[in-house]
């Protein structure tokens, strides 16, 4: 990982500015404005989905952009192929985030193939993993950052409602590359706990950028019981 980007992210917040299909917020201009709001609040970088949104964000926001491309809704669908990864680099992503779990990729490639292609194209790779073994393997295959993004969402990883701080700590203690805490971080306290566990940086998404989901949580709370 290049030293300037590592230094820029150290101990800081990355905001995931995304919206699921069908959500009223899923509009390129809206998502770009969300990244601008994240920058105004002090974010060190943003994580965005889809080459179109990546390109628009790169044009509008002077922050490192971590790009991903969700294609599908099961199996490996976060930047699932080399083609997806290179489209994100072409759109201007400084870092390409991709599923690095042990599951088969739809084009039959290996995660290492994606890493090699992205590096040759001049960008970095963030490996989204669900277990310690996957994180270790991703680092060995050349990932520049390893994120705990998929812990709890993939069979074989612990199902929990809180951040997987144990995985953060285990990876941070074993890997030479920066470990990024991501997944179910809902409060500033949890973000601080992730840094204390050894995370290089922390990604927060829903707790900041998902008004539909947050509204539903309040509605559920009012109607409970």
Image (cartoon, helix red, strand yellow):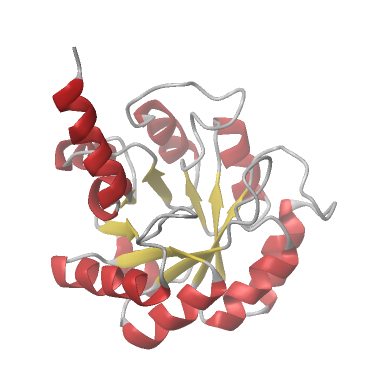
Does residue 179 sit above or below 9 in this rendering? Answer: above
Extreme residue toward the top, this view: 225
In this rendering, would 218 be left or right of 65?
left
Looking at this view, is 88 or 164 the one in front? Answer: 88
Q: Image quadrant of residue 80? A: bottom right
In the rendered image, residue 187, in percent from the top left (x then y), is placed at: 19, 39
Residue 93 seen: no
Q: Is residue 188 left or right of residue 168?
A: left
* Nearer the observer, 122 or 80: 80
Quadrant of the drawing holding the C terminus = top left
Q: Residue 93 versus residue 69: which sits nearer the camera?
A: 69
- The residue lying at 31 percent from left, 81 percent from top is 61
Position of residue 150 measured from the top left corner of the image (x, y, whole percent): 51, 39
Up the image or down, 168 lies above or below 90; here it is above
In the displayed orientation, state which residue is furthest to the right. 108
Residue 161 locus on image (x, y percent): 35, 25
For image coordinates 32% across by 27% down, the residue present is 162
Image-based side of 157 in relation to 186, left or right: right
When the figure is inspected, residue 190 is found, relative to residue 144, above or below; the finding is above
Residue drawn at (49%, 28%) of the image: 152
- The residue at the point 78 percent across, 42 percent down is 104
Locate residue 167, reporting x and y percent.
Answer: 44, 30
> Could you tell me if residue 18 is visible in this image?
yes
Q: Is residue 221 above or below residue 175?
A: above
């Amino acid at each position: 990982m290049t030293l300037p980007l590592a230094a820029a992210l150290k101990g800081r917040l990355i905001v995931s500015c995304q919206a699921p299909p069908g959500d009223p917020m899923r509009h390129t201009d809206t998502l770009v404005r969300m990244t601008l709001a994240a920058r105004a609040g002090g974010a060190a970088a943003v994580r965005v989905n889809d080459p179109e949104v990546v390109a628009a964000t790169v044009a509008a926001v002077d922050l490192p952009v971590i790009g991903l491309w969700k294609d599908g809704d099961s199996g490996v669908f976060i930047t699932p192929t080399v083609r997806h990864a290179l489209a994100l680099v072409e759109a201007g992503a400084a870092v390409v985030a991709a599923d690095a779990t042990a599951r088969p990729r739809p084009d039959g490639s290996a995660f290492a193939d994606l890493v090699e292609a992205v590096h040759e194209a001049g960008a970095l790779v963030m490996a989204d993993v669900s277990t310690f073994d996957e994180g270790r393997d991703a680092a060995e295959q050349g990932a520049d950052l390893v994120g705990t993004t998929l812990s709890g969402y993939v069979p074989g990883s612990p199902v929990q409602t809180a951040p997987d701080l144990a995985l953060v700590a285990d990876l941070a203690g074993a890997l030479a590359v920066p470990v990024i805490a991501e997944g179910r971080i809902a409060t500033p306290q949890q973000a601080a706990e992730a840094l204390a566990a050894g995370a290089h940086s922390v990604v927060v998404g829903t707790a900041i950028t998902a008004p539909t989901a947050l509204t539903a949580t309040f509605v559920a709370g009012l109607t409970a019981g």
